């Protein structure tokens, strides 16, 4: 081998070594870029997941808000309707008193018109959700009835309502006006002795 061949081999080896060094450097650069891309991808994936969770929470919050507002509107509507009905109850009472007062034959046509208006008014408030409390024959309930009078009797069970002076009204379970009633009570032997 000549000196020229040795120099060539050294040069080729240097070129190969430098090519290997460049390839290694390039591989390191690619690996670093790949690692950087993986890190950035993981960061973007985490951000996307966080945004998804935030969106789901916001959607749930909005759905709860929508339900709450709907419920509040319904309750407001019920309260407003209850106030209107409370204002109409004395009108119904007036109709009942007027119908009870004029039973003579000369008032018959007048009475029929009055009855028609009364029935329409009562039907319309019943359609709105009003229940009329007319509890004759039922046990006294202080949440629904107001005792105006009591009658000592043994013909009826103790606490049974004998007469309704004024009917009561319920609106979706809420008492607008308690029924004014007469209640049966059993005579107390001690009170009989005191009277004698």
Image (spheres, rainbow, N blue to C red):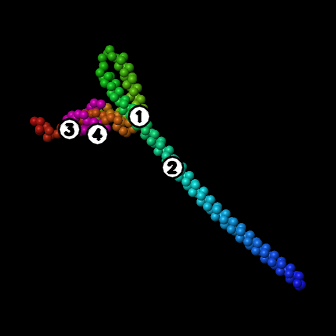
How far separated are the C-alphas under marks 4 and 2?
A: 42 Å
Q: Secondary structure at mark 3?
A: loop
In the figure, is residue 89 to the left or right of 148? Answer: right
| Residue drawn 21% across the image and 37% down it | 185
Q: Nearer the viewer, mark 2 or mark 1?
A: 2
- Residue 74 seen from this side: yes
Answer whether labels 2 and 1 touch (C-beta < 8 Å).
Answer: no
Residue 1 image offset from top left, x and y in percent: 89, 85
- Compare marks 2 and 1 and give the one earlier in the sequence: 2
- Compare marks 3 and 1 and give the one earlier in the sequence: 1
In the rendered view, tell whether residue 42 sits above or below residue 83.
below
Query: Which residue is the site of mark 1?
Result: 81
- Compare marks 2 and 3 and give the one earlier in the sequence: 2
| Residue drawn 79% across the image and 73% down it | 19
Answer whether labels 3 and 1 touch (C-beta < 8 Å).
Answer: no
Identify the magenta region: 139-166
- Residue 139 seen from this side: no
| Residue drawn 34% across the image and 17% down it | 108
Q: Which label sits on residue 186? A: 3
Q: Secondary structure at mark 1?
A: helix
Query: Which residue is the site of mark 2?
Result: 61
Quarter of the image with the C terminus in it: top left
Q: Nearer the viewer, mark 3 or mark 4?
A: 4
As drawn, the residue found furthest toward the left would be 196
How far separated are the C-alphas under marks 3 and 4?
A: 18 Å
- Any magenta on residue 161? yes
In the figure, is residue 48 to the left or right of 29? Answer: left
Query: Which residue is the site of mark 4?
Result: 142
How far separated are the C-alphas under marks 2 and 3?
A: 59 Å
Q: Secondary structure at mark 4?
A: loop
Q: Nearer the viewer, mark 3 or mark 1?
A: 1
Q: Nearer the viewer, mark 4 or mark 2?
A: 2
């Amino acid at each position: 081998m000549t000196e020229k061949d040795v120099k060539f081999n050294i040069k080729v080896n240097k070129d190969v070594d430098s090519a290997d060094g460049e390839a290694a450097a390039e591989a390191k650069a690619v690996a670093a870029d790949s690692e950087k891309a993986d890190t950035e991808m993981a960061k973007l994936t985490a951000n996307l997941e966080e945004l998804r969770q935030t969106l789901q929470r916001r959607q749930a919050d909005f759905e709860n808000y929508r339900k709450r507002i709907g419920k509040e509107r319904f309750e407001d509507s019920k309260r407003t309707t209850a106030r209107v009905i409370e204002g109409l109850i004395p009108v119904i009472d007036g109709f009942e008193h007027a119908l009870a007062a004029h039973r003579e034959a000369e008032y018959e046509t007048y009475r029929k018109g009055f009855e028609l208006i009364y029935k329409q008014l009562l039907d319309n408030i019943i359609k709105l959700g009003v229940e009329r409390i007319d509890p004759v024959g039922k046990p006294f309930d202080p949440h629904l009835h107001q005792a105006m009078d009591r009658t000592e009797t043994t013909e009826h069970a103790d606490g049974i309502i004998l007469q309704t002076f004024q009917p009561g009204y319920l609106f979706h379970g809420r008492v607008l006006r308690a029924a004014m009633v007469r209640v049966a009570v059993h005579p107390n032997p001690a009170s009989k002795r005191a009277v004698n």
